[in-house]
Structure formats: C-alpha cells, structure tokens
Image (cartoon, grey):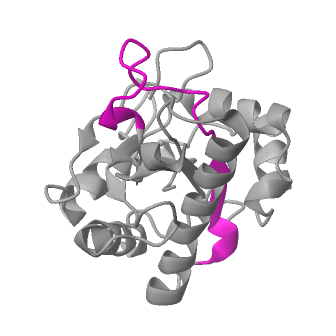
Amino acid sequence: MAKHFQSGNLTAIAAILTVGTALSFGIGAALAADEVTEDQILRALTPAKKPLTRGLSVGGAAAPAANPAESKFVSSVRGRTTRSLSASEREEIAAIVKDKPKIDLEITFDYNSADISAKSIASVQALGRALSNAELKGSTFVVAGHTDAAGGEEYNQALSERRADAIKKYLIDKYGINGSDLVTVGYGKSKLKDPNQPLAEVNRRVQVVNMETKVTAQK
C-alpha cells in the first residue's frame, strides 16, 4: 500500500484555503511547487476589499460584523492539535472556509513520510514570507492536508495530519508565526479535488485558507 504514496504530495494551511463535494473547501487554483511565489500566495489569501455603502463617508465605513457562532468555533479550535479534531469538527471547518480566500499548493514529501522534500522547500518558504506580510499577519489560517484515494482511510487520514503538522512546524520554527494562528486539519482522501481521477496528483495537496479572524489572533 505504501508504494502508492511515493510521490507523497499534499497540496495545503494557510489564512484559511478544493473538492467537488457539498462540504468542500471551494475551488482554488493549484500551483506547482516550482511555480508558486510569495506574491501569488499573498494575492490569493488577501480578502477582497468590500465597496463602501452609499451614504457612508470614507472614514465611517465599518467592517461587517463577524458571525458570533463562527468566531466562537474558530476560537475553540485555535491551538488544538491536528489529531484532536473530531470528524464533525473537521467538517465544520470545511463548511466555514468554503468561501474564504484560499490557495492550493503542491508540496511534496519524502517517501512515506512527513519530511518536506528538498524541491518543495522554496514553496513553503514563499508561504512563510506571505503569512508574515503585514497584509496577512495576525489572521487565523487553516492548513489542510489532503491525499489521493490510494490506500486505506486510516492511513491516509494519519498521513494528511502529519504532513499538515510538518508545514505548521516549519512556519513556526523558520518564520516565527504564532502556532495558535495556524489551525491544522487532515482530510485524508475524503475530499478529492478531482473525484473523476481519484489517484491523480492534483488530489495530493495542502490547502491554506485565510479565516480573516484577526480579532481573535494573537499579535
């Protein structure tokens, strides 16, 4: 079974970030490991600025109120370990981030492990720089690991969690990003980006989503 994971790719988060199911994370552009840049990540994860409502002055425009229930749930999963999330909590995260700014990254790992491959380090570094940018710094990000459909559910679930954790650790160790600002979650093979080609490389990904909850983030 392990041989199916030789490519070991996950395309993953960050401020929270696609699959063809009702509870998918939505459609995001997948970028190959040697193509992604800091600017591409920054643009994908930066929320679109909302136009001012007629009758409001420039100085009087207020940001839309946060959904209290959503904010409460996000606060409850911040700082949690990846493996501690229940199946229902993983699905709730998927539902919440469906329409949030997101990006899929093709990040490869060494054979049957959670060690980031040498050829993908540049992409993870670009992610670290983007999340450290003033435009994004302090937001809460989901880092979600996905696998293809090869192998058993339990194996894929554990592998996706370990690889999401590896990305989180790298971002904390190398870029000083607050660990509580990174919500890591694994979906195994449950949310294929291309269900018609379950073994396709595009399904092995790490998705980063910007949750935009700076009010709860620790600066």
Report the span colored magenta. Answer: 178-203
The one nearer the camera, 12 or 180, is: 12
Give the vertical position of 56 relative to 63 (above or below). Answer: above
The quarter of the image holding the C terminus is bottom right
Q: How many marks?
A: 0
Residue 168 place in picture, x, y as percent: 56, 70
The one nearer the camera, 17 or 119, is: 119
The one nearer the camera, 56 or 208, is: 208
The answer to whether any part of residue 218 appears in the image is no
Give the vertical position of 20 relative to 138 (above or below). Answer: above
Residue at the spot 47% in from the left edge and 72% down from the top edge: 115
Determine which quarter of the picture holds residue 117.
bottom left
The quarter of the image holding the N terminus is top right
In reply to whether residue 183 is colored magenta, the answer given is yes
Determine which quarter of the picture holds residue 177.
bottom right
In reply to whether residue 167 is colored magenta, the answer given is no
Residue at the spot 40% in from the left edge and 67% down from the top edge: 110
In the rendered structure, the answer to whether residue 36 lies left or right of residue 169 reads left
Residue 63 place in picture, x, y as percent: 55, 43
In the rendered structure, the answer to whether residue 72 lies left or right of residue 132 reads right
In the rendered structure, the answer to whether residue 133 lies left or right of residue 19 reads left
Residue at the spot 35% in from the left edge and 39% down from the top edge: 48
The answer to whether any part of residue 32 appears in the image is yes
Residue 163 place in picture, x, y as percent: 55, 60
Residue at the spot 36% in from the left edge and 44% down from the top edge: 103
